[in-house]
Amino acid sequence: MKYLISVLIAFFMGSIPFAYIVGRVTKHIDIREYGSHNPGAGNVFHLISWRAGLVALLGDAGKGFLAMRIIRTLYKFPPAILSYCAIFAVLGHVFSPFLKFKGGKGAATTLGSFLYILFVTLRWKALLLLFFLAIPWGIILIITHSQVVSLAVTFPFFPPLVYFMTHDKNFALATVIFVIMLETLGIPSLRREWPKAYEKYVSRLFKKH
């Protein structure tokens, strides 16, 4: 029963559509009808303002963080089980019942969920892990100018870093499953973003001057 309760907590907290709410409250618009049509913080940043985008980002990250904290407070689960719960928090964001099961990409909710799990597990060493992840993310972002591409390249670095820093096989396996889910859900966006990024930015690196 405790696993079912945890999954329900994670899913329904993850499903709260903060970007959509911010769009409605600040500009009285449906964020899904403008810009990238994605009900996520990135679209709020582009369409409304950095302040509104920051609120949406903190909301989407915060719901993942808070969901993990509530679940761990209730049941004292180890990191591996919390990681499986985080999968459902992200699925709640991606398939939000409040948005007819068509939500955002889940990057901010992923960040919030694992910020809590990593800091519970590693304490200050979590900052070091995040720093190592930020290196490939930053390099690819500079090259491609695409958050979608940079995240797709960075996610596979996460499980080996988790294992290297925790030596917890179960935790690392849970993050492998999590990354596979994220990469699978991100395939449509990657197919859309990569040709644009390659044509506008990456191809320039291979041109002879």
Image (tube, rainbow, N blue to C red):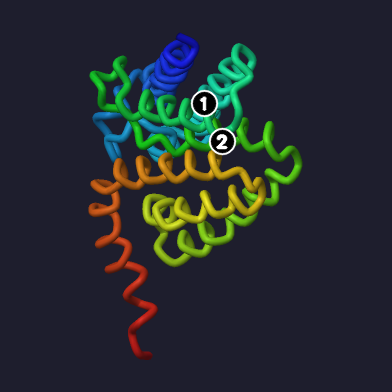
Relative to 133, residue 75 above or below: above
Residue 26 in view of the camera: no
Question: Residue at image x 69%, y 46%?
Answer: 127
- Label of residue 64 in the image: 1
- Label of residue 115 in the image: none
Residue 198 in view of the camera: yes
Q: Label 1 is placed on what type of residue?
A: Gly
Of all residues, the one furthest to the bottom in this rendering is 209
State the residue in front, 173 or 147. 173
Mark 1 residue crowding within 10 angstroms, few (<14) / some (14–19) / many (20+): many
Q: Position of residue 104 (x, y in %)?
A: 34, 32
- Label of residue 114 in the image: 2
State the residue in front, 57 or 6. 6
Q: Are marks 2 and 1 in contact (CB under 8 Å)?
A: yes
Q: Secondary structure at mark 2?
A: helix
Question: Residue at image x 59%, y 32%?
Answer: 79
Q: Label 2 is placed on what type of residue?
A: Phe
Of all residues, the one furthest to the front in this rendering is 169
Which image quarter: residue 185?
top left
Query: Is 152 situated left or right of 111 in this image?
Result: left
Q: Position of residue 111 (x, y in %)?
A: 53, 37
